[in-house]
Image (cartoon, rainbow, N blue to C red):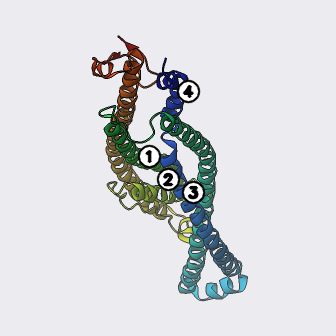
Amino acid sequence: MSQFTQALANAAVRNRELLSTLAQTDYAATALQQNKSYTSDLESQIRATDKELKKLHTITEDERKDHLKYRDSTFKRYAHKLGGSKGQAKFSSKSEKEEREFLEAWQKEREAEERRSELMQALNVASDDCTRLEHDKTRNDGAQAELDGLYNSIFSGPTPDLPGEDQLETAVQNARQHFEQTQSRFNTDCAALEALRRVENRMQAASASMNDALHASRMDMFGGGTFTDMMERDALSKASVAISEALRHMDQARHLQPAIANLREVNVDMGHMVSDVMFDNIFSDMAQHDRIHASNQQVMEATAQLKEQIDAQVQRSKSATAALRQAEASVKEARAELQNIRAEAFQRLGAGGNGEAMKAPPPVYVENVGGFGMRQ
């Protein structure tokens, strides 16, 4: 057995192991790059949200103090009462304004807190993914470097004695580059679909809260009282928060995949605390019920629109999956062809080591990527 053939025999087992490792970890480099970009974006959003929260908390506290100060002012209430119905209406209008400004500020702060909590959860998941991807990329880099060294030790420089070998090396490089591009598209479409699923989850929560609000509103029309009013407002507040979260996830999905259309506008009417609770009557209850029903209709329409976007993104993800599988198959095929021609050349050299042996018909290759299995 010549030194050349012996080198091939010695490398066969390790070659199979390295090719297997590469097949398992080829995805890691592209996925890790996207993960780091995603993590950086999350960290930036968290910093911005922290600044926003600080400002919103200050505003909320100021509005709360103004609201409580005016609401609990016995003197102002008595002074307006002396003014008759006009005075009472003026006090009610001013009190409602202060209460509305406080609730709006509180709502914004609450939404910002929820947003920060979600961002932190996403960052923790991304950090865990980063650790796994870095490990797989290290394995991939190590296997690729060792495989390159193994081949270089056997095929140093051009190999004119093996027609087609150099061209197949180039084909492997091109196939790998195409695979990385396809992997990037696949990752992006999958991430966009996941974001849409989060939108769907939040819209379902909003729909459930709107149904709770409608139920409380019906009870209120039949004399439910102040407690029912508060249940109704709490359900509406939860629906509003869920809608805000859904819109944030929708922005993420559209950033990843511009083909996704934005949701239609959804306005959750919170009603008016003073008129709906302090001056509760059947007419205000019916008016508020109509407003809730209109808001719920908007939620239903947005949910139907979202379903269309999810269906379209599912199709895009399926297309990306098929393209990725094809690209992966192309890489494996190119590697197998390169490995095949090398294995055939070594086998023929081992058979005789002369020109006639090199011209003999090649053996039939029966094993795909791993090893050098052949049949004469």
Res 106 visible: no
Give the residue at mark 1: 187
Point out the tag, 1 or 4, that comes first from the N-terminus. Answer: 4
Q: Nearer the viewer, residue 296 or 58?
A: 58
Q: CA distance from mark 1 to mark 3?
A: 15 Å
Q: Is residue 291 above or below residue 73?
A: above
Q: Indicate the amino acid at tag 4.
A: Arg
SS category of the residue bearing label 4: helix
Whether pointer 2 and pointer 4 mark residues with C-beta atoms closer than 8 Å, the reply is: no
Q: Indicate the amino acid at tag 2.
A: Gln
Point out the tag, 2 or 3, that comes first from the N-terminus. Answer: 2
Q: Residue furthest front?
A: 354
Give the residue at mark 2: 34
Label 4: few (<14), some (14–19) or many (≥20) C-alpha neighbours in 10 Å: some
Res 108 visible: yes
* Residue 126 horizontal/vertical position (percent): 59, 50
**Which mark, residue 368?**
none
Label 3: few (<14), some (14–19) or many (≥20) C-alpha neighbours in 10 Å: some
Q: CA distance from mark 1 to mark 4?
A: 31 Å
Whether pointer 1 and pointer 2 mark residues with C-beta atoms closer than 8 Å, the reply is: yes
Identify which residue is drawn at 43% across, 17% down: 373
Label 1: few (<14), some (14–19) or many (≥20) C-alpha neighbours in 10 Å: many
Q: Indicate the amino acid at tag 3.
A: Thr
Give the residue at mark 4: 14
Q: Is residue 205 above or below residue 248?
A: above
Q: Nearer the viewer, residue 259 or 21?
A: 21
SS category of the residue bearing label 2: helix
Point out the tag, 2 or 4, that comes first from the N-terminus. Answer: 4
Give the residue at mark 3: 39
